[in-house]
Amino acid sequence: MADIEARTEVTGAVWKIVAEIGQRVEAGDTIMVIESMKMEIPVVTEQAGTIRKFLVNEKMPVSEGQVVALLTSSRP
C-alpha cells in the first residue's frame, strides 16, 4: 500500500472538511473546502484511495502546496 498526499492549491483557511477518516474516495473527489479571498476552493484527490489522516482542522490556515490529508492507496 502506498501513501497519497492531498495538497491544497491555494493559501487560505479550511472552511469545511467534507470527507471522513476511513472513507474510500475516487480520483477527483472533494475532501475539503478552502476559503480563500471569499471564494470556496475544493481540495480534490488526484488518485483513488482511503482517507487515513487529516493534517489540518476546520478554520486552520493553510498555505499553497501544503499537505492537508494522507490517503492509503490499494495499488502497490
Image: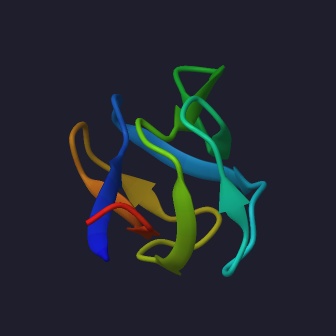
Question: Residue placed at 26% from the left, 46% from the top?
Answer: 63
Q: Is residue 26 left or right of residue 63?
A: right
Name the residue nearer the viewer: 71 or 73.
Answer: 73
Q: Position of residue 50 (x, y in %)?
A: 57, 68
Question: Residue placed at 53% from the left, 38% from the top?
Answer: 43
Residue 36 vs 25, above or below: the answer is above
Question: Residue placed at 41% from the left, 64% from the top?
Answer: 73
Residue 59 vs 1, above or below: the answer is above
Residue 44 vs 14, above or below: the answer is above
Question: Which image quadrant for residue 35?
Answer: top right
Q: Position of residue 6 (x, y in %)?
A: 37, 51
Q: Position of residue 38 (x, y in %)?
A: 64, 21
Residue 39 vs 5, above or below: the answer is above
Name the residue nearer the viewer: 2 or 35.
Answer: 2
In the rendered image, the quadrant that contains the C terminus is bottom left
Question: Residue placed at 52% from the left, 59% from the top?
Answer: 49
Find the residue positioned furthest to the front: 76
In the rendered image, the quadrant that contains the N terminus is bottom left
Q: Position of residue 48 (x, y in %)?
A: 52, 48
